[in-house]
Image (spheres, rainbow, N blue to C red):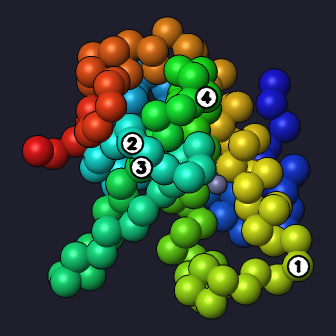
Amino acid sequence: MEIPLAQQFSDLQFAKDADGWLESIGDKSISEQLAEGKITEIIICTVAVKGLLLPIELTTGQVFFRVLISNLNSFDESYFVLGHEISHTFEVYKEEHRKYRASKSWPVGLFELVEKFCDEFSKIWLAINGKEKIVMFFENSGAVFGKFYGRN
Ligand SMILES: [Zn+2]
């Protein structure tokens, strides 16, 4: 069994929420999982990093997320990136994290810790879903350059 994230990352309060969500996956489809994470679009494009989670804040105060995945990634890297970015939805709107992101000044080591957390989350996420389910999702969504998942 995997060691719970809350145990591995006891300094990150949201790790417990992430563990609970991972446990709830069961046989939910990837689309259902994305909907729960409020991820409405995935775009494969030219981007300077392997992946990015972009919050979209509506005037109503509702928040959705768009995931950008680098077109230079291999498929395996893209699957991993998707899990990693889902994981960011657990922390990105925590009050103190918004502050750090806005000012681009994180307490020493915290940014790296969050990135490590997201990588560990993604490994568990991939293991729970199984590669086949994620490959199917990408294929059925037409994973090509440009938007392949989400609203038109
Ligand atoms: Zn990250």
Question: How far apart are the alpha carbons under marks 3 and 4?
Answer: 14 Å
In primary-sequence order, the first of circles 3 and 2 is: 2
Residue 2 percent location from the top left of the image: 80, 31
Is 85 left or right of 7, judged from the image as shown? left
Question: How far apart are the alpha carbons under marks 3 and 2?
Answer: 10 Å
- Give yes or no for contact between labels 1 and 4 (Cβ–Cβ under 8 Å): no
Q: Residue furthest left?
A: 152
Q: Residue furthest top?
A: 132
Q: Quadrant of ligand 1?
A: bottom right
Name the kind of residue labelled 3 in the image. Answer: Val
Residue depicted at 88% across the width and 71% down the height: 109
Q: Quadrant of the C terminus?
A: top left
Residue under numbered circle 1: 108
Label 4 environment density (alpha carbons within 10 Å; few <14, some 14–19, many ≥20): some
28 and 139: which is toward the camera: 139
Label 2 environment density (alpha carbons within 10 Å; few <14, some 14–19, many ≥20): some
SS of the residue at dot 1? loop
Between circles 4 and 2, the one closer to the viewer is 2
Residue under numbered circle 3: 67
Between circles 3 and 2, the one closer to the viewer is 2
Question: How far apart are the alpha carbons under marks 1 and 2?
Answer: 31 Å
Residue under numbered circle 2: 45
- Give yes or no for contact between labels 3 and 4 (Cβ–Cβ under 8 Å): no
In primary-sequence order, the first of circles 1 and 2 is: 2
Residue 119 percent location from the top left of the image: 72, 43
Is 106 left or right of 32, judged from the image as shown? right
Q: Quadrant of residue 81?
A: top right
In primary-sequence order, the first of circles 1 and 4 is: 4
Residue under numbered circle 4: 77
Residue depicted at 75% across the width and 41% down the height: 120
Residue depicted at 60% across the width and 66% down the height: 91
Name the kind of residue labelled 2 in the image. Answer: Cys
